[in-house]
Image: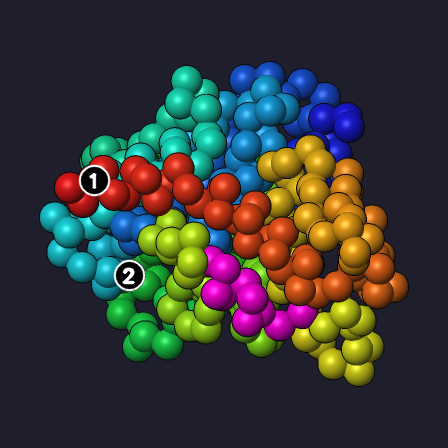
Amino acid sequence: MDAYELISRNTEEVVTEEEVEALAEDPEGKRVYVGYEPSGVLHIGHMLTANKLIDLQEAGMEVVILLADVHAYLNGKGTFEEIEETAEKMRKQFLAYGLDEDKTEFVYGSEYQLDDDYALDLHKLELDTTLNRAQRAMAEIQGGETAKVSHVVYPLMQALDIEYLDLDLAVGGLDQRKVHMLMREELPEIGYEARPCLHTPILADLGTGEGKMSSSSGVTISMEDSTEDIEEKVNSAFCPPTRDPEDDLENPVLEIFQYHVFPRFETVVVERPDEYGGNLEYDDYEALAEDLESGELHPADAKGALANYLDELVAPGREKLREIEQ
Ligand code: IYR
């Protein structure tokens, strides 16, 4: 796989392809980041962007994880002290998940976002951005909350982070795209360069195949789940063998194979008793999806394998959480 393929695989959007192709020509030492509002426990959404960071690390880039404590505070996630505690827990789980400790820099937003020069640049952006624009950028991030002044400051700070962390590339779920578009428009207005972005998809709900899977609604997988929890959730997942072109439901079992399992395991083995045809082995996602579609692979066998691989991915983070709680 060439560098551009590794950098851009499994993304929903690359902004812009030309800019990311230019980075891929010499990825060594380029700085890339994801910011997370600390929430204590990693869930499958965090794991998806972390998979992309692992790809980028493999391509030679330097990874920065912003533990966005001030942003979480602005988004009403608790007192500053509570947020700091959950941020440290998250840092440990990211390392347990497989990010390379020597090549990952963790930064707390509060380390630089309260400095004078940052505050003055923020006010410059405030002067230059309409309320409407900032509110639109936040719509998917703030959920159903009534907009407060803090919610319009938030995306401007997120734009400024990209300059202050000296980044070459920003990564986020598709829910971050409007903030990133604001960044691309507004940073040049105050004399800084716009940066390219990669957006990962938002996966469907495990139980229904609808909308987006998140920690707040529907069924999700997190580092708090036991092996049995994972088996139970995966076993009751929505997994139609063929996709109905009439509806827009996704197959969440296939999505998790594609975005979580294949990027982290070279071959995937589906164990089956000999009387049902014996084990199946796959080197890529497409082959597994085809077998499910054709009936060669039964959904129950696919789910059994998925639960095992997910459990393997979650286990080190689950251990870390147990250590912290003791
Ligand atoms: N908006 C993100 C958190 C966040 C991301 C970045 I990239 C920042 O620079 C700051 C905050 C979220 O929704 O979790």
Confirm if mark 1 falls within 8 A of ligand 1: no
Q: Is residue 183 or residue 127 the one in the foreground?
A: 183
Q: Residue at 57%, 39% (x, y): give it.
A: 52
Name the residue at the bottom extreme: 246
Above or below, 166 relative to 227: above
Query: Which label belongs to residue 75?
Result: 2
Give SS at disc 1: helix
The amino acid at mark 2 is Asn
Vertical relation: 110 (above or below) 220: above
Residue 258's place in the image compared with 150, above or below, is: above
Vertical comparison of 72 with 87: above or below: below
- Span highlighted in magenta in the image: 230-239
Q: Are marks 2 and 1 in contact (CB under 8 Å)?
A: no
Q: Give the residue pinned by disc 1.
A: 324
Could you tell me which quadrant the C terminus lies in? top left
Residue 227, percent across and down? 43, 53
Helix, strand or loop at disc 2? loop
- Give the x, y percent position of residue 253: 64, 61
> In the rendered view, does 207 fall on the left or right side of 106?
right
* Residue 232 forms part of the magenta stretch: yes
What crowding class fits label 2: few (fewer than 14 Cα within 10 Å), some (14-19), or many (20 or more)? many
Q: Identify the residue shown where x is 51% and y is 32%.
A: 32
Residue 67 x %, y %: 32, 41
Q: Is residue 66 magenta?
A: no
265 left or right, relative to 179: right
Q: Position of residue 279 (x, y in %)?
A: 75, 46
Kindly identify the amino acid type of the residue bearing the numbered disc 1: Ile
Query: Residue shown at 13%/56% (left/top)?
Result: 79
Q: Residues within 10 Å of mark 1 (few under 14, many from 20)?
A: few
Q: Is mark 2 within 8 Å of ligand 1?
A: yes
Residue occupying image coordinates x 77% and y 38%: 283
